[in-house]
Amino acid sequence: MHWDLSKLYGGFDDPKLAADFAQAQALNRELAALLQEKPEDVGALLAQAVRTEQKLSEKIALVGEFTFLNLATNAKNEQALAWMDKLMRAQVEIQQTSSAFTRYVSRVQDLDALIAREPLLKEHEYMLKTMVKDAEHVMDPAIEGPVLKMQMTGGEAWSQLSDQLMATHMVEIEIDGEKQSLPLSTVRGMATSPDAAVRRRAYEAELASYPRIDLPMAACLNGIKGEALTMCEWQHYDSVLDTALDAAKIDRQTLDAMLTAMRESLPAFRCYFRAKARHLGHEGGLPFYDLFAPIGAAGKTYTLEEARQLLVQVFGQFSEKMSQFIDRAFEEHWIDAFPYEGKQGGAFCAGVHPLGISYVLANFEGSLDSVSTLAHELGHAYHGDCVKHLSILNANYPMTLAETASIFNETMLVAKLQEGANSQERLMLLDQQIGNAAQVVVDILSRFLFESEVIERRKDHTMLPDELKAIMLDAQKQTYGDGLDENVLHPYMWACKTHYYSAGLHFYNFPYAFGLLFGLGVYERYLEKGEAFLPEYDALLAATGLGDVKDVAARVGIDVTDVNFWRKSLSVVEKMIDEMEKLA
């Protein structure tokens, strides 16, 4: 199944695409001119500026998502690459206007009174007050334009190169006695094979393939993190981590509380890894290539249609609205399901707010993990459905809250499958759930440590592949500990994880842990309240772009600054580990 992008445009030659792009540029010029005016009624001007920003954001969302989605499925699409270049150049002017808008709002006298008087401003109160706070991090107008232009051939170019390298990287591997050249995403997907020999061979072939691209990938990483340090200075942040916390809408107290609980949980996760190793016949720690090995009852293989039916049935027991939404996503071809050459690995969901729909990229290979991934991404899509009635300016939520619905979906899927399962089926499901949690707690912590060290070292030198591999191995040893075989780790995890290569978003890791643990907390609320929680759940998702994380979480009685909340969420996983050890 390929996704159908015709709801956006008929193709890159569609006249509507060029017209929308031209209109976006015109709206940006209109907004810039508006901000130069000195009206008697500042409230009316602000309202007009918000309306113009809304229209501009909608047009850019349409053109930008169409271009991004085409590139995600064909990294060599020349038309998409050309349009991405156009968008990046236009983004320079749009960002400058956005910064001017932020500076303008920060200088407005009696903003609270204007907000109280103008309904449109009241609707966008959180956005406007956030702009006032953000003003201290806006670059000096004298340097902003040149800096943004240089970023196009700096961090953004490095990021684009890393995407192209990964999407086109082929791995030489022998399968059934025949040498084949397969996409990296396909080979990495073999980690879930029930055949131990296939898992090991795929791991070894993957590692053997990276030296062909590790030097340019290292250059990409050095370029992106070097730029991050410079931008940090010019935007008046104390550290790159502070920029990430700002983007995540949380404070250091919240992050520290969560990291404390995560570190405390590491011994339990190491017990899980060792139990799985014993079950698979290994002495000591688990070799990296068996991290995702299926255990318990032989994992059922699903066709895409069977996955669809399962998800519709499972979520129909929770909410008819969600069940119908999932069915619609399949029926209307919002999903690009299978791996193929040139397509990005992994999975994501991209919302197109002006259309009120979301597109899901997956690399479906029939395992329960693939079904769980679909449930996860369709959770993101459902989240998008819950905010589609809002202004596009109120529909942007931080990554920390972006995982709420996806984790909720994963948790519910496994819980429903466990009902009536025998001991071996339950072992398989527990392993699936704990393994996913381990990725989001243990592996994410290793990524956080890796990125922290890379940024620190980047202050005085660039790092070659061998140094990056050593940092990666050290981070894995600190987190996985004796749970893994220290001689069979993955020194190239820095190369295959696209999260490190985002030019505008750093520490693209801890928000996933936040999302898992917050999502588990929300699921616990559902178990306590039952069907009465459904309207509260939809309202929570709709509010995710309307306040700081602390305030949004408080809506469902959660204090994210309290380490005990995070401990309670992790205790849910620790209980699963106890049960898994008994079954294994």
Image (cartoon, rainbow, N blue to C red):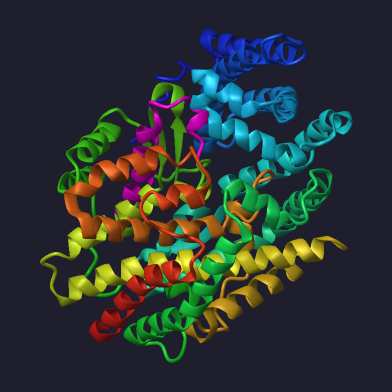
Q: How many marks?
A: 0
Q: Is residue 170 magenta?
A: no
Q: Which residue, as the protein is rendered here, is positioned at the far left? A: 420
Q: Which of the pair 116/357 is nearer the observer?
A: 116
Res. 300 visible in picture: no
Q: Is residue 383 magenta?
A: yes
Q: Which of the pair 522/275 is nearer the observer?
A: 522
Residue lying at 36% horizontally and 77% vertically, measured from the top left: 574
Q: Where residue 426 sits: x, y (%)? A: 20, 72
Up-down relation of residue 272 to residue 80 (above or below): below
Q: Where residue 507 sits: x, y (%)? A: 63, 56
Res. 385 visible in picture: yes
Up-down relation of residue 310 to residue 107 (above or below): below
Up-down relation of residue 220 to residue 480 (above or below): above
- Magenta segment boundaries in residue numbering: 370-397
The image quadrant of residue 63 is: top right
Q: Where residue 260 sits: x, y (%)? A: 54, 73
Q: Where residue 292 sits: x, y (%)? A: 40, 69
Q: Which residue, as the protein is rendered here, is positioned at the far bottom? A: 283
Q: Which of the pair 360/73 is nearer the observer?
A: 360
The quadrant in which the N terminus is found is top left
The quadrant in which the C terminus is found is bottom left
Residue lying at 30% horizontally and 51% vertically, measured from the top left: 409
Name the chief secondary structure element in magenta: helix
Up-down relation of residue 339 to residue 145 (above or below): below
Residue lying at 30% horizontally and 84% vertically, measured from the top left: 581
Residue lying at 60% horizontally and 24% vertically, measured from the top left: 113
Q: Which of the pair 517/339 is nearer the observer?
A: 517
